Amino acid sequence: MAITYKNVFWDFVLDPLRDLFVSEYAYGKIYIAPEIKHKDPFSIRIWGNSANKEEYVVDAHVRQYNVK
């Protein structure tokens, strides 16, 4: 039996948000990190501050992710 893991938070929340900012702003540092790494005049840091389980059934669950 093979078990796979998909990081939904990264693949469908954080990374698409970063891609959106990268396409909008052609300068500065845009990164995903829990703490500030760049002190440039223009930088955007993205990180999640919470995740809540909204619904759970036997074969699926729904989660809500909040980002800062």
Image: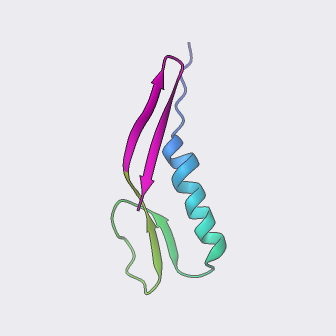
Give the residue at the far front of this rendering.
54
Left or right: residue 22 versus residue 33 is: right
Q: In this view of the protein, which residue sits in the foreground, 52 or 21? A: 52
The percent position of residue 5, horizontal first and vertical second, equals: 52, 31
Judged left or right of residue 15, residue 46 is: left
Q: How is the image coloured?
A: rainbow
Q: Residue furthest top?
A: 1
Quadrant location of the N terminus?
Answer: top right
Percent of width and height locating residue 45? 43, 68
Q: Is residue 5 magenta?
A: no
Left or right: residue 42 versus residue 37 is right
Q: Is residue 60 magenta?
A: yes
Looking at the image, the residue that sits furthest to the right is 23
Q: Which residue does the image show at 53% across and 80% down from the upper left? A: 28
10 w.r.t. 29: above or below = above
Q: Locate residue 9, reporting x and y percent.
A: 49, 45
* Residue 41 point in image, percent of width and height: 43, 87
Classify the position of the C terminus by image quarter: bottom left
* Residue 56 sits in quarter: top left
Give the magenta-colored segment's residue range.
50-68
Residue furthest left in the image: 35
Looking at the image, which residue is at 57% across and 47% down?
11
Q: Is residue 23 above or below residue 65?
A: below
Position of 12 relative to 35 (above/below) = above
Image point 42% across, 53% down: which residue? 66
